[in-house]
Amino acid sequence: MRGLIILALITTMGLSACSPQGDRLDPMINAGPEAPDGTAVLRDAVDPLLVGHRLMEAGEYELALRAYYRAGADYGTTADVLTALGSANLRLGRIGQAETLLREATDVAPEFPAAWNNLGVALMEQGEYGEARQVFRHAYALDSGQSDSIRENLRLAIARMENISYDEDNNESSFDLVRRGGGRYVLLSTP
């Protein structure tokens, strides 16, 4: 086996030495022909987080997840990236993965209310109403009570804990995650 690896390396090195272009690892040699004069050259790409948010709004959760992974490659594992990844996984029904990512986001930035709110949504989806209540309460305190969506999520968690339904005709309501801007998602109860 070792002999095959050495033979493959020698063959590869020999072929690259015979190449008319020389060193194939040099990006300038393989860059291709220059663009004609007057051609607009794009230097900066669109922010992958923004692309992901727009894809989420369009209901393209799998594509949004890919955009968020690109954002992670560009920016690292920031709270924004982790929260976005968690939210996309929530929409795709990957609740366990979402919870893990959102818990990591709250560890990275413990003062980020959107991460706490979205973690509460993941917990609600799993029926963990008590913990979700505490998480929403924490998110609401971090947000200084300015977000109606976090307050509504807290109210839903309290109602679920106390087995009170806002929909008296149908107690089988489910939850829906809706993006509200600024990285915030609201949990809505739907029949």
Image: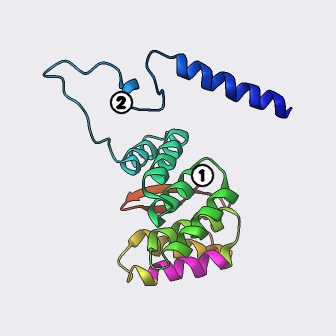
The reply to whether the magenta stretch includes residue 134 is yes
Asked whether residue 80 appears in the rendered view, the answer is yes
Reading the image, the residue beneath label 2 is 28
Where does the image place residue 33, in percent across and percent down from the top left?
30, 18
Magenta segment boundaries in residue numbering: 131-140
Q: Amino acid at mark 2?
A: Met
What is the quadrant of residue 163 in the picture? Answer: bottom right
Q: Which secondary structure lies at badge 2?
A: loop
Where is the N terminus found, in terms of image quarters? top right
Q: Is residue 166 shown to the viewer in this render?
A: no
Q: So how many labels did they put on this image?
A: 2
- Mark 1: which amino acid? Asn
Question: Which residue is identified by label 1?
Answer: 89
- Asked whether 68 or 114 is in front, the reply is 68
Q: Quadrant of the C terminus?
A: bottom right
Q: Residue at x 47, y 64 (%)?
A: 78
